[in-house]
Image (cartoon, rainbow, N blue to C red):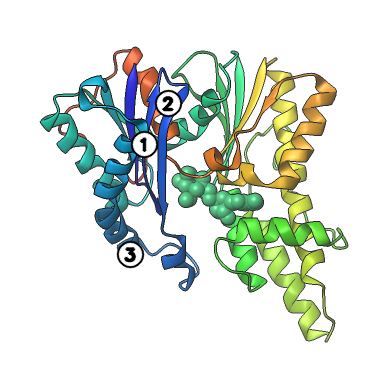
Amino acid sequence: VVILGIETSCDETAVAIVKDGKKILSNVVSSQIESHKRFGGVVPEIASRHHVEQITYVLEEAMEQAAISWREIDGIAVTEGPGLVGALLVGVNAAKALAFSKHKPLIGVHHIAGHIYANRLQEEFKFPLLALIVSGGHTELVIMKAHGEYEVIGETRDDAAGEAYDKVARLLHLPYPGGPEIDKLAKQGEETIAFPRAWLEPDSYDFSFSGLKSSVTNTIHNAKQRGESLKPEDIAASFQASVIDVLTTKTVRAAKEYHVKQVIVAGGVAANKGLRSSLQQEFANLQIPLQIPPLSLCTDNAAMIAAAGTIAFEQGRRSGLDLNARASMLLK
Ligand code: ATP
Ligand code: FE
Ligand code: MG
C-alpha cells in the first residue's frame, strides 16, 4: 500500500509518500518558521497564505523524490484537524482535488494520530501501548490496544507543554519557537529555583502547565523588583526540571498501571533532550521498550499523516469529497 500524505495544520507545508505505513519514499517539509519569527508566534493569516504558495511545489518535490507515478499511489491522506482552520483548508482542498482528479480514495487523518504513527515509521507497534503526546497544542497520554484505537487517559487542562515552553521562552526574550532555545539554555544552567509541580489529584493523568508559567513570571518579576538578577540559564533549567518531572512521573505510572508493552513519545516537545534522557533512564530501569522518533519526525511532517492514513486505509475507512477542515476534533 502506497499512501500520499498531506499536512498543513499549522506552520509546516508538508507532503510525503509512505509505503506500507512504514517505509518513507519521500518526506518534504517546507517550514514557515522564519516568516512567523518576528511576530513571536504563528500568525494564522500568514500561515494560510504560505500554504497556498507552497503546496504545489512541495507536492511536486515529494512525487519527484519518491520517483513514483500516480498509478502507484493507492490513496490520499490529509490532516483534517485539529489545527488552524484556514491552514487546514489548504491541505484538505489539495487532497480533495487530487482524490477527485486522480481517482484515489481520500482519508481524513487526526493530526495527533499522525504524531503517534510517526513512531511506526521506526518500528512496529506492540500493544497495549502507551503514547505520550507532547506538542505545541497537545499534552496527552493515550492507551492503544489495537491499530487506530485511541483511549485518552489524560490531557492538559490548560496550556500544552510546548505552549508553556514557548511562553516561558518569550519571558526570557528568546526567539520563537522557544522549545529548542530553552532546551539549549537549560543545559548550561542548574535547578536553583524550586518551581511547582502540578500533580493534580493523586490518580489523575491530566496535566496543567499554566501555574508553572505564572510561577516563572512572578519569580522573574519579584527578582527584578528586588534588584536581583536571576541567570536565564537557571530559570530555563528549573522550568525544564518541573516539566520533565511531571511528564516522566505520570508516564511511568500509566505504563505500570496499564501493563503496556511499549511506550512511544510523539510531538515537537519529544525533541527535548532533557525529556528524552529522563524517559530513557526510567524505562530502561523498568525494562519497558521506549521509542522516540528522530527529531525530523517529532515535529510536523506528512510522513506521519501518511503512516496513520495507511492504517485507516487498510481498515477500510474513507472520507467523502465533502471532507471539511476541523479546527477542533477529538482523537478517536
Ligand atoms: P499540535 O501538534 O498540538 O497541533 P504543533 O504541530 O504546533 O501542535 P509540533 O510542531 O508538534 O506542535 O511541536 C512544536 C512545539 O514543540 C513548539 O511548542 C516547540 O517549542 C516545541 N519544541 C520543539 N523542539 C523542542 C525542544 N527541544 N524542547 C522543548 N520543546 C520543543
Ligand atoms: Fe503537530
Ligand atoms: Mg509546528
Disc 1 is placed on an element classified as helix
Q: Nearer the viewer, residue 174 or 67?
A: 67
Q: CA distance from mark 3 to mark 2?
A: 28 Å
Instruction: Please report the residue visible at 64 percent of the width from the left and 32 percent of the height from the top.
Output: 292
Q: Which sits earlier in the primary sequence, circle 3 or circle 1?
A: 3
Q: Nearer the viewer, residue 54 or 253?
A: 54
Q: Which residue is mark 1?
A: 65
As drawn, 215 above or below 28: below
Q: CA distance from mark 2 to mark 1?
A: 18 Å
Q: Is residue 37 visible?
A: yes
Q: Position of residue 79 (x, y in %)?
A: 34, 37
- The image quadrant where one finds the N terminus is top left
Left or right of 108 on screen, residue 150: right
Amino acid type at image mark 2:
Ala
Amino acid type at image mark 1:
Gln
* Tag of residue 46: 3
Q: CA distance from mark 3 to mark 1?
A: 28 Å
Amino acid type at image mark 3:
Ile
As drawn, 212 above or below 110: below
Residue contact between numbered discs 3 and 2, judged by CB atoms under 8 Å: no
